[in-house]
Image: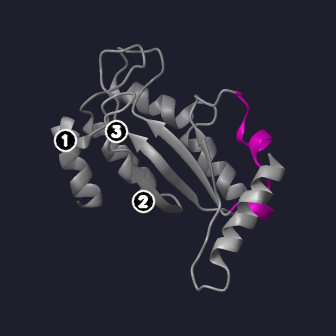
C-alpha cells in the first residue's frame, strides 16, 4: 500500500514538473464495499503521500431493501468506515476530505437503494457544508444501477437547489 502511494505521489509530482499547477493524491474507500473489511487506519499509506482522504458511497443500506430514508442515512453515517469515521479520520490526520463518487441507487433490489430520495441529497448537502470537503462528484450514470439524477426528479430538484446545475 505504501509503495503504491509513493509511486502515485511521484507520478503526480512528475506530471506537475515546474508548471504552476496543483497535483493531489486522493485516497478513496467505499463505505462497506471495500473487500478487505479493514478500517481506514489499516489501509492508510501515510500522511506524507496523501493530500485528500476520499470516500465513495451511494444511497443504499446494503441488503435492507425496505429501509427508510432515515435508516439508510444512519447506516451511511454511522457504520464502520462510514461518513462519521471518514470525517474523524481525516481530521485526525489534518487532511481535507472528498467524495469523488456518490449517487442515488434505484429501488427494488437487495442493494437497498432509495430511488428518488431528496432526503439523502438534503443531508448530504448539509454534511458537505459542515465538513472540510475539497470536492465532490455525483456519479450521474446508468451503470450497475441507474444513478442518473434525471431519473429522480424530486432528488434532482433538491440537488440543483443545493449545488447548482
Label 1 vs 3, first from the N-terminus = 3
Count of all numbered marks drawn on residues in the image: 3
Which residue is depicted at the point 72% across and 56% down?
92
Q: Return the x and y of residue 116 as percentages of the image width and height.
A: 24, 32
Q: Is residue 104 left or right of residue 111?
A: left
| Neighbours of disc 1 within 10 Å: few (<14), some (14-19), many (20+) | some
| Neighbours of disc 2 within 10 Å: few (<14), some (14-19), many (20+) | few
Q: Mark 1 — residue?
A: 150
Quarter containing the N terminus: top right
Dot 2 lies on which element? helix
Camera-side mark, 1 or 3: 1
Image vertical order of residue 94 relative to residue 79, above or below: below
1 and 2 marks in contact (CB < 8 Å): no
Q: Is residue 91 left or right of residue 71?
A: right
Image vertical order of residue 84 relative to residue 26, above or below: above
| Neighbours of disc 3 within 10 Å: few (<14), some (14-19), many (20+) | many
Could you say which disc has been placed on residue 129 in the image?
Answer: 2
**In the image, which residues are magenta?**
36-50
Camera-side mark, 1 or 2: 1
Q: CA distance from mark 1 to mark 3?
A: 16 Å
Q: CA distance from mark 1 to mark 2?
A: 24 Å
Quarter containing the C terminus: bottom left
**Is 47 colored magenta in this rendering?**
yes
**Is 91 colored magenta in this rendering?**
no
Q: Return the x and y of residue 81 as percentages of the image width and height.
A: 63, 36
Amino acid at each position: 500500500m505504501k509503495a503504491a502511494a509513493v509511486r502515485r505521489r511521484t507520478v503526480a509530482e512528475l506530471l506537475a514538473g515546474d508548471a504552476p499547477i496543483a497535483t493531489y493524491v486522493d485516497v478513496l474507500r467505499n463505505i462497506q464495499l471495500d473487500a478487505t473489511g479493514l478500517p481506514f487506519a489499516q489501509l492508510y499509506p501515510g500522511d506524507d503521500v496523501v493530500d485528500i482522504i476520499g470516500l465513495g458511497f451511494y444511497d443504499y443500506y446494503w441488503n435492507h431493501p425496505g429501509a427508510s430514508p432515515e435508516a439508510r442515512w444512519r447506516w451511511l453515517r454511522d457504520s464502520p468506515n462510514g461518513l462519521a469515521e471518514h470525517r474523524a479520520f481525516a481530521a485526525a490526520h489534518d487532511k481535507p476530505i472528498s467524495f469523488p463518487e456518490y449517487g442515488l441507487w434505484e429501488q427494488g433490489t437487495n442493494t437497498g437503494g432509495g430511488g428518488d430520495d431528496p432526503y439523502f441529497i438534503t443531508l448530504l448537502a448539509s454534511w458537505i457544508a459542515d465538513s472540510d470537503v475539497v470536492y465532490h462528484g455525483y456519479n450521474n450514470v446508468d451503470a450497475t444501477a441507474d444513478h442518473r439524477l434525471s431519473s429522480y426528479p424530486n432528488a434532482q430538484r433538491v440537488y440543483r437547489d443545493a449545488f447548482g446545475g
